């Protein structure tokens, strides 16, 4: 037995060392998810992120912070106090705050349209900008009669317009567009393009679309019976025929996949900014009825929301 006891002690010591190593490793994967808003879409992103990172890196500790009601300096302090290895910023406000205040942490953003503003070496992420081929394919599915699409854009959304214009011929479609230089251009430009097209497709551009122009657009759409394709279910509910948006839960999963790559040793600078992998659409059956648009039953079944 004299020889067995040391062996048992040795086994116990090795086991303790192993468990200590496992615990130390478990504490290495720390993520702070900083959210610009507590809106439902942001919550879906967080849920998707937690679900996916748990399957990719089960030891990861995720802390979520919402900017609502917190001063910027306090939010930065909370993020740093958690000692994260990776920061996930959800939305423009959170991403801008992290970009301006944190340079020595890897940052993964999502829920951002204008990704060209975030090209630092320590930042990568997932854009909100849906690929034009995906968007136009879905448009043809929900509105098979479409041939010509109206678009208004400014210098801010030139890239989005250019991508749509380049892809349209591949889908058998034509883009008829006008560039907006200032607010006063909107009514005339809208009248011009809507008179030549089968529908009107919004692009993400706060210089072109804000409360007054959105209200004007939707009223003119109903008055002159040209369907509008909006940027989220908010627009569909407000009077657009339909809207495209990304699948927010999958956006969270996609952000988790990028985070897992950073944990494996890659750097943000090595990972290209990605586009959403999935999109969803909402439909207004009420608007379709007023415009005498026949919506295929399958389209209604597959819609994320149908407004009657």
Image (spheres, rainbow, N blue to C red):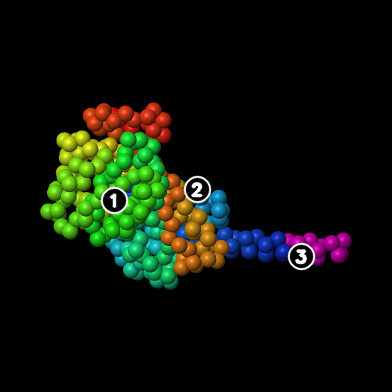
Q: Residue at x 32, y 29 (%)?
A: 294
Image location of residue 73, percent across then percent down? 31, 66
The residue that label 1 is drawn on is 203
> Secondary structure beneath disc 3?
helix
Image location of residue 13, percent across then percent down? 72, 64
Identify which residue, 74 or 131, lies in the foreground. Answer: 131
Q: Residue at x 19, y 42 (%)?
A: 195
Q: Is residue 144 left or right of residue 28?
A: left
Quadrant of res 143: top left
Foreground mark, 1 or 3? Answer: 1
Image location of residue 41, percent across then percent down? 36, 46
Foreground mark, 2 or 1? Answer: 1
Q: Quadrant of the N terminus?
A: bottom right
- Marks 1 and 3, the one that precedes in the sequence: 3
Give the residue at the far left of this rendering.
184
Q: Residue at x 16, y 45 (%)?
A: 191
Q: Is residue 258 visible?
A: yes
- How many marks on residues? 3
**Which mark, by number, is residue 51?**
2
Quadrant of res 147: top left
* Residue at mark 2 to residue at mark 3: CA–CA distance: 39 Å
> Secondary structure beneath disc 2?
helix
Crowding at dot 3, Cα within 10 Å, few <14 / some 14-19 / many 20+, comes out as: few
State whether the magenta stretch is mostly helix, strand or loop. Answer: helix
Crowding at dot 2, Cα within 10 Å, few <14 / some 14-19 / many 20+, comes out as: some
The residue that label 3 is drawn on is 10
- Bounds of the magenta segment: 1-12
Above/below status of 47 relative to 242: below
Q: Residue at x 20, y 35 (%)?
A: 225
């Amino acid at each position: 037995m004299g020889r067995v006891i040391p062996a048992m002690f040795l086994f116990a010591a090795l086991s303790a060392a192993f468990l200590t190593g496992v615990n130390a490793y478990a504490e290495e994967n720390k993520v702070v998810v900083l959210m610009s808003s507590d809106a439902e879409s942001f919550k879906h992103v967080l849920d998707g992120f937690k679900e996916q990172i748990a399957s990719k890196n089960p030891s990861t500790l995720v802390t979520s912070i919402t900017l609502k009601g917190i001063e910027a300096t306090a939010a930065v302090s909370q993020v740093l106090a958690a000692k994260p290895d990776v920061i996930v910023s959800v939305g423009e406000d959170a991403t801008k705050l992290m970009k301006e205040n944190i340079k020595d942490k890897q940052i993964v953003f999502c829920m951002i349209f204008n990704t060209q503003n975030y090209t630092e070496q320590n930042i990568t992420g997932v854009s909100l900008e849906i690929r034009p081929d995906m968007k136009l394919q879905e448009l043809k599915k929900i509105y098979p009669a479409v041939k010509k699409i109206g678009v208004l854009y400014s210098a801010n959304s030139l890239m989005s317009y250019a991508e749509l214009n380049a892809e349209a011929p591949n889908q058998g479609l034509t883009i008829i567009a006008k560039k907006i230089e200032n607010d006063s251009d909107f009514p005339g430009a809208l009248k011009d393009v809507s008179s030549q097209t089968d529908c009107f497709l919004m692009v993400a551009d706060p210089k072109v679309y804000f409360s007054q122009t959105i209200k004007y657009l939707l009223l003119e759409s109903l008055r002159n019976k040209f369907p509008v394709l909006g940027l989220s279910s908010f627009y569909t509910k407000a009077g657009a025929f339909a809207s495209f948006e990304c699948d927010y839960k999958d956006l969270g999963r996609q952000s988790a996949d990028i985070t897992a790559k950073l944990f494996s040793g890659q750097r943000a600078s090595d990972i290209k900014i990605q586009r959403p992998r999935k999109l969803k659409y909402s439909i207004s059956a009420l608007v379709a009825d007023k415009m005498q648009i026949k919506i295929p039953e399958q389209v209604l079944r597959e819609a994320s929301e149908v407004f009657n």
